[in-house]
């Protein structure tokens, strides 16, 4: 996670600083460098997990890019007819290759905002409150890490393929920060920790597992990957909600639930690098491997959520 954070901070700043302070002196060179830098920033913005730095950081990079472009032109005054040296041509070729790669990544991540061809399941968003942020979601692996479990060449993924279109949800404050500190070790330092989770569909609890401890960040439980979790059978499909706080479940196997019934509280049990709610829908799995069913895309309140989407839900209506 630390390397990931540094990459999202340092790499964009290096690209922007390069454009501002040492751009090519030729108009062709600075034009290509500017275009490729813009494409790279778009790709980083689309694929990054913006928890720290926060979700608004790509907009700041956009402002800095415009300022860097203006500064590069004003300070260095590139000439239309100035010949390029061979290092200049090498740099241009490098930028074009880099821009082509970044553009492909951005385009592929953009297609991930649309549901896969499989029939989508309609659910009610399982949390109540402001500023929920999607950190994994969508139909492309660039914005949803769960899709790696569709790789049938890795035998261990077959037991968890039902989560392939899964969604991971955290909560941030008004400044876009999700915790006290950058990567605090204690789960209670995260804003979403302890948030009530509600049934996203009407059905029956087929499995309710409790008793696993919260993990200290960034440790994860590689054996009991779902941690404390609930499986709901809602008609022809199942919904799995995972990583609950220990001793927070208020449902048991066999219970019937209605939409909006309390289920548990968000925690950090199982293979969870930090507190979040994991939810996915699937065709029923086997008894031995309950998360191995065919994965199904999900729409929450009619919306297909992807990485960096933000969600605010009103509190339940109360009787007057």
Image (cartoon, rainbow, N blue to C red):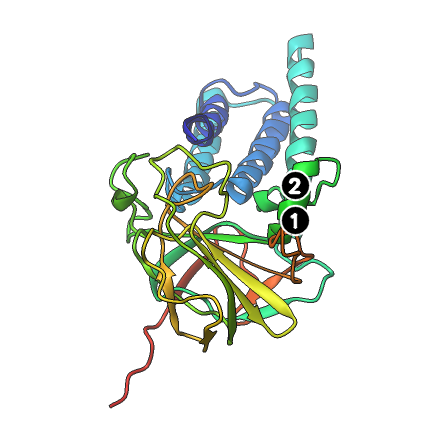
Please tell me in which quadrant of the rendered image residue 280 appears.
bottom right
In which quadrant is the N terminus drawn? top left
In which quadrant is the C terminus drawn? bottom left
Real-space CA distance between mark 1 and mark 2, rounded to the nearest whole angstrom: 6 Å
Contact check, label 1 and label 2, Cβ < 8 Å: yes
Classify 71 as above or below 112.
Answer: above
Residue 276 falls left or right of residue 207: left
Can you name the residue that lies furthest to the top here?
86
Q: Residue 22 bears which disc, if any? A: none
The residue sitting at 47% across, 41% down in the picture is: 271
The residue sitting at 38% across, 33% down in the picture is: 218
Classify 180 as above or below 131.
Answer: above
Residue 132, percent from left and from top = 39, 57
Residue 316, percent from left and from top = 33, 77
Residue at the spot of label 2: 157
Residue 193, percent from left and from top = 31, 51
Nearest to the observer: residue 195 or residue 87 = 195
Nearest to the observer: residue 240 or residue 83 = 240
Please tell me in which quadrant of the rendered image residue 235 appears.
bottom right
Q: Residue 161 bears which disc, if any? A: 1
Decide if residue 85 is in sight here. yes
């Amino acid at each position: 996670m630390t390397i990931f954070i540094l990459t999202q901070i340092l790499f964009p700043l290096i690209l922007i600083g390069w454009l501002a302070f040492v751009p090519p002196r030729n108009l062709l060179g600075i034009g290509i460098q500017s275009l490729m830098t813009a494409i790279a920033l778009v790709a980083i913005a689309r694929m990054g997990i913006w928890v720290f730095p926060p979700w608004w950081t790509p907009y700041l990079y956009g402002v800095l890019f415009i300022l860097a472009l203006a500064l590069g032109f004003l300070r260095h005054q590139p000439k239309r007819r100035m010949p390029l040296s061979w290092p200049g041509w090498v740099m241009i070729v490098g930028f074009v290759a880099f821009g082509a790669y970044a553009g492909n990544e951005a385009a592929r991540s953009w297609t991930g905002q649309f549901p896969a061809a499989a029939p989508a399941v309609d659910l009610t968003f399982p949390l109540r409150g402001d500023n929920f942020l999607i950190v994994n979601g969508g139909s492309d692996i660039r914005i949803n890490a769960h899709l790696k479990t569709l790789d049938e060449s890795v035998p261990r993924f077959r037991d968890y393929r039902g989560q392939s279109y899964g969604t991971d949800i955290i909560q941030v404050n008004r400044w876009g920060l999700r915790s006290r500190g950058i990567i605090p070790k204690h789960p209670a330092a995260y804003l979403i920790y302890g948030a009530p989770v509600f049934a996203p569909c009407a059905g029956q609890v087929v499995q309710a597992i409790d008793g696993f401890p919260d993990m200290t960040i960034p440790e994860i439980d590689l054996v009991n990957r779902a941690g404390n979790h609930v499986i709901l059978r809602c008609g022809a499909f199942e919904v799995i909600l995972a990583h609950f706080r220990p001793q927070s479940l208020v449902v048991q196997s066999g219970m019937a639930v209605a939409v909006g019934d309390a289920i548990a509280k968000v925690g950090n049990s199982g293979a969870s690098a930090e507190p979040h709610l994991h939810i996915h829908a699937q065709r029923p799995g086997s008894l031995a491997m309950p998360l191995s069913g065919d994965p199904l895309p999900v729409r929450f309140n009619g919306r297909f959520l992807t990485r960096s989407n933000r969600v605010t839900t009103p509190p339940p209506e109360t009787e007057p």
